[in-house]
Structures are given as C-alpha cells and as structure tokens.
Amino acid sequence: MKPRKVPTPGWNFEYLMWLFIRISGAAMFLLALIGFVGALAMGARTQMDLGTLMRWTFFPNPNHVLNSNIVDIAPWANAYWQIMQLAIVFFGATHGFNGLRLILEEYIHSWGWHMFLRLVLLILWLITLGAGFFLVLTS
Amino acid sequence: MQVTLKIFRYNPETDKKPHYETYTVEAEPTDRVLDLLEKVKGEQDGTLTFRRSCAHGVCGSDAMRINGVNRLACKVLVQDLGTNRITVEPLLGLPTIKDLVVDMEPFFEHYRSVKPYFINNDPPPKKERLQSPEERARFDDTTKCILCGACTTSCPSFWLDDQYVGPAAIVNAHRFIFDSRDQGAEERLKILADQFGVFRCHTIFNCTLACPREIQITRAIGEVRKAIATGRLD
C-alpha cells in the first residue's frame, strides 16, 4: 500500500491545547516522580513523615521540609529545584485552566460568553502563574 | 411471560409536558423490543408513535433508549435485557417530536457538514477506480454505519453542546478520508480540526458501546486526530 499524505490543517488553538493537555499531564507525573526520588535522596526514609514527603514530591519547595529532620536543607534550595517548582506551577495551572475552559465552553454556547469567559480565565491564569512564580522565586 | 413496558409519551398537540405510561404485554423471551412496541400499538394504544422500517437492524430507524442504553429496538431480545420491566425512551440530545420519535435534522446537518460523499476531480477511468484489498480494508469498519444516531445521542459532549459534529459524522468522514480513491481528505480534516470537531471528543467510549454495528468509533476518531496531526493517511 503506497503511503498517502495530505497537508495538515495546521496548528490551530484547539489542536494545540489538546496536545498540551496530554503533554502536561504526562509531564506532571514525571515531575512528581523526580520530586519523589529527590526526597528519597534527601533522606526521606528516615528523616521525613509521609505528609512532608508528599509535599516535596508535588512541590519541591525547601519550606516544605523545614520541620522535618533533614539536617542540611541548603543543598536542596537551589535553582534546579526552583525550575522544577516553576514547571509544576506552569503545567498544573495551565492544564487546570484549560480544563476549566473546555468545561465552560461545553456548557455555555454563546460566542459572546465564550469570549468573555476566555478573557476572565486568561486573567485568572496569569494571576495564578504570577502568584506561583512569586512564591517560588522569593522563598 | 408478562413484560411491563414503561414508555415515554409526549404529544405536542395535547400534552404540556412528557409523561410515562405503563403497558403490560404477553411476550416470548425471544421477542424483540420492537415486537412489544408493535403489540402495544396494535392491541392497546394506537396513538403510540415510533419509527421503524426494515426491522432487521439495517435501516437504523428504531434507535431508542431501552433501559437507559441506546439500542435498536429490532435487535434487542427481551431475554437479553435480563428483566421483565423495560423502559423505552426517545434518544437524548435531539428534540422529541412525538413519543419515541426525535427530530434527526440536527444529526443529519452535522453528517452533511463533513462531506460524506466521494470526492475525486480526476476524469473517471474507462472501467473503474481500482483499489487493493488492503486499501479497501483500511476503512472497512466505518462503512458499516447505518446512521441510526445511537452513537451521537449517547455522547455527553454532544448532549452538552449540539454544535459538536458528533461521532457519527466523524465515522462517516473517516470512511472517505481513508479511502485511497478519494481526494477530499484535506478539506474534511480541516472541518474536523475546528473548535466543534474531533477535539471535543473526550474518549468517553459511550459511542463505541452504543453502536449496534459494533464499529470501533473511538478508534476511528483517534485515527482522524492522528491524520490531523501528521497528515498521514495510511
């Protein structure tokens, strides 16, 4: 069978977001796994309770392990873990807000409301990202 | 055996709102639900309205909700339902015209929107447009669609927003997109990449479960998505 190929319709918004939802979903699993392994390397088995371990796993911020028995947190408060946190904030917030957009657009059918709600969600998404990034970069 | 049929009734000329009526009929376990509806209409209440034509699972006229699941009334045997209490309702997501009859026009509008016909602007060859058995097999599954509407009206995405083209339209687009003789794939993929196209599908699989022809609908939708992303039609 000879392969048939047609020009693709291109990168429209719906396709892009559909792709993003899948990539970010997988990315969040991967980031949590890295956080989990990081916590174990930090000494979670003996120095952390389960709650602390989970907090670091899903958001590897040094403040989350302040009350644990980890002796020296300084090596974990570095740019690498900050980037991990920023990635989690970005993927989580964008994934969630796009999900919210899809749900709203399925229930609400007028074009005007769509545009209005997209704008509201865009603003809320930017505020969430701003607040999250601020927290990561200043803690 | 005695079967109790609870049937959705609505006559827009006399009823303000729909209601259910209950009928008791004598039935064999091997009777089809369509037989019971015929029995009610012929012996108890001639005003009961429903669509039917071939009564053999080919024309797709009598798709309805039987005990909460979209099925063809002519393909469901009483013994397969595992109960002698049967609830029959019209398809969801389309306006009810009367009793079990729904307005199929929104469904067919979506069907027409994907250009469900052969497109090839080359002059026709002397005999026929040839195709290998493998090329024919590529879209065999989606040729089985009988346009009963059971899939589209079982889809929660369609219930929420009837602007979504729905699984049946995508299945029929798939039938031509992957046909090696057809040249309309590009325009169909463009239509289906739209806001109300394939990306509205959340892989719920209701359509696949509802299809009386056992078409792998969710798989077909996935293949169309893949074609949109890659442009490959093999």
Image: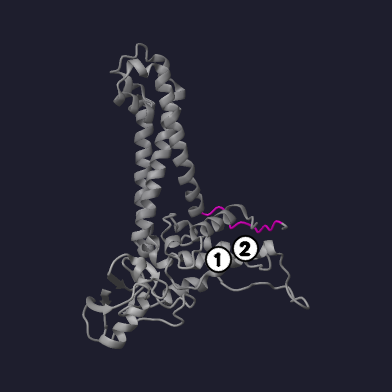
Image coords of residue B134 (percent x, y): 68, 61
Give the residues in magenta. A3-12
Subunit bearing disc 2: B
**Which residue is rendered at x = 38% and y = 49% of the image?**
A99
Q: Amino acid at mark 2?
A: Phe
User: Are the residues at dot 2 and dot 1 in contact (C-beta closer than 8 Å)?
Assistant: yes
Q: Main secondary structure of the magenta part?
A: loop
In the depicted structure, whether residue A125 falls above or below residue B63 = above
Using the rendered view, name the quadrant where residue B156 is placed.
bottom left
SS of the residue under disc 1:
helix
How far apart in space, not on screen, are marks 2 and 1 (Cα)? 10 Å
User: B65 or A46: which is nearer to us?
Assistant: B65
Q: Is residue A7 magenta?
A: yes
Q: Number of labelled discs?
A: 2
Q: How is the image coloured?
A: one colour
Residue A98 belongs to magenta span: no
Mark 1 highlights which residue? B142
Q: Residues within 10 Å of mark 2 (few under 14, many from 20)?
A: many
Residue B178, numbered circle: 2
Q: Chain of mark 1?
A: B
B224 on left or right of B128: left
- Which numbered tag is attached to residue B93? none
Of residue B73 and residue B138, the one placed in the foreground of this image is: B73
The percent position of residue B163, horizontal first and vertical second, equals 42, 66
Quarter of the image where the C terminus of chain B is located: bottom right
Taking A78 as reference, is B141 left or right? right
| Figure quadrant of residue B61 | bottom left
Q: Residues within 10 Å of mark 1 (few under 14, many from 20)?
A: many
